[in-house]
Image (cartoon, helix red, strand yellow):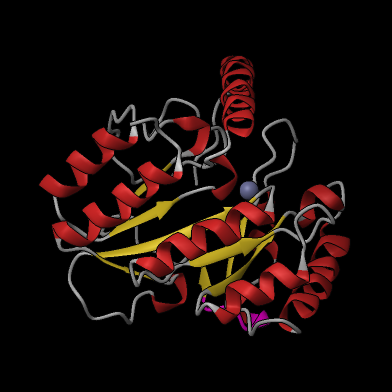
């Protein structure tokens, strides 16, 4: 089975449920009382249509999750956001305000508040995750060294609120589930290094070692359209090479 296709995504959903996991929204951290919870997080970096497709697949399995939307024009599609809300999912805010404000903290927090208000016209947003631009000199999370996201009615900040000594964190960033290989900014200092090349390996690992997990899945990486799949493969390969170069020269920042 080809990886990062909807066929594989259905297999992943089914396998998580069969293994005894309870997928849930990010806003349910830490209140969800089930054991073996999967805090299912989707960062919508591109292609909102693919986010909607992924939500429909999860709905087939009775799974709920959180879709974090950027507010850039190519992603911020109100109709699609409303459709995802109608399906019963949580909408979060995928912020990149320090990048947009070129490192000006006062401008960045004003923009954060403005964009959050816009998004709250569609959904009562309580969860945020930062968008990491690999080649930017800024780390959007640094905003919270100066300000407190709780002052803006945020309950869950994906990199700050979860206790990663208790919740395992895995991401499809860079087309691999390895914790080290292709991530530049998306790293958690408490996460142990695991080698998980593909989604089948990930399923085997999660099924054999049940515990609370935060899974970050980018909808734009998953498709059933061959042209998009090939484009994504090329895009991920090129950006992985670029990230390796940056790591070599600049080092890696951990939270
Ligand atoms: Zn992102």
Q: Position of residue 19 (x, y in %)?
A: 15, 57
Q: Position of residue 188 (x, y in %)?
A: 43, 45
Residue beneath the point at 51% across and 31% down: 174
Q: How many marks?
A: 0
In this orientation, which residue lies closer to the viewer: 3 or 179? 3
State which quadrant residue 81 falls in.
bottom right
Residue beneath the point at 66% across and 49% down: 45
Residue beneath the point at 40% across and 78% down: 28
In the image, taking residue 177 as reference, residue 236 lies left or right, namely: right
In this view, 32 is above or below 172:
below
On the question of residue 189 being in view, the answer is no
In the image, taking residue 36 as reference, residue 181 lies left or right, namely: right
In the image, taking residue 245 as reference, residue 33 lies left or right, namely: left
Q: Is residue 174 magenta?
A: no
State which quadrant residue 243 falls in.
top right
On the question of residue 33 being in view, the answer is yes
Q: Position of residue 192 (x, y in %)?
A: 28, 39
In this orientation, which residue lies closer to the viewer: 97 or 52? 52
In this view, 198 is above or below 215:
above
Seen as rendered, the residue at the extreme left is 208
Q: What stretch of residues is rendered in magenta?
A: 151-155
In this view, 44 is above or below 238:
below
Q: Position of residue 229 (x, y in %)?
A: 57, 31
């Amino acid at each position: 089975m080809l990886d990062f296709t909807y066929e594989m995504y259905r297999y992943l959903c089914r396998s998580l449920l069969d293994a005894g996991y309870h997928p849930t929204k990010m806003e349910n951290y830490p209140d969800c009382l089930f054991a073996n919870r999967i805090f299912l997080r989707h960062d919508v970096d591109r292609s909102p249509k693919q986010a909607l497709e992924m939500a429909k697949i999860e709905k087939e399995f009775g799974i709920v999750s959180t879709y974090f939307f950027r507010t850039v024009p190519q992603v911020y599609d109100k109709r699609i956001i409303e459709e995802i809300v109608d399906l019963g999912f949580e909408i979060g805010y995928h912020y990149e305000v320090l990048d947009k404000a070129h490192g000006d903290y006062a401008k960045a927090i004003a923009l954060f508040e403005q964009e959050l208000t816009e998004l709250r016209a569609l959904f009562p947003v309580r969860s945020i995750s930062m968008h990491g631009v690999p080649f930017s000199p800024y780390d959007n999370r640094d905003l919270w060294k100066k300000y407190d996201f709780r002052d803006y009615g945020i309950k869950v900040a994906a990199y700050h609120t979860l206790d990663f000594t208790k919740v395992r964190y895995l991401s499809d960033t860079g087309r691999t589930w390895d914790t080290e290989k292709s991530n530049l900014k998306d790293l958690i200092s408490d996460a142990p290094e695991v080698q998980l090349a593909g989604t089948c390996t990930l399923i085997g690992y999660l099924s054999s070692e049940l515990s609370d997990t935060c899974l970050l899945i980018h909808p734009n990486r998953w498709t059933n359209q061959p042209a998009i799949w090939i484009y994504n493969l090329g895009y991920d390969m090129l950006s992985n090479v670029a990230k390796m170069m940056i790591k070599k020269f600049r080092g890696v920042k951990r939270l």
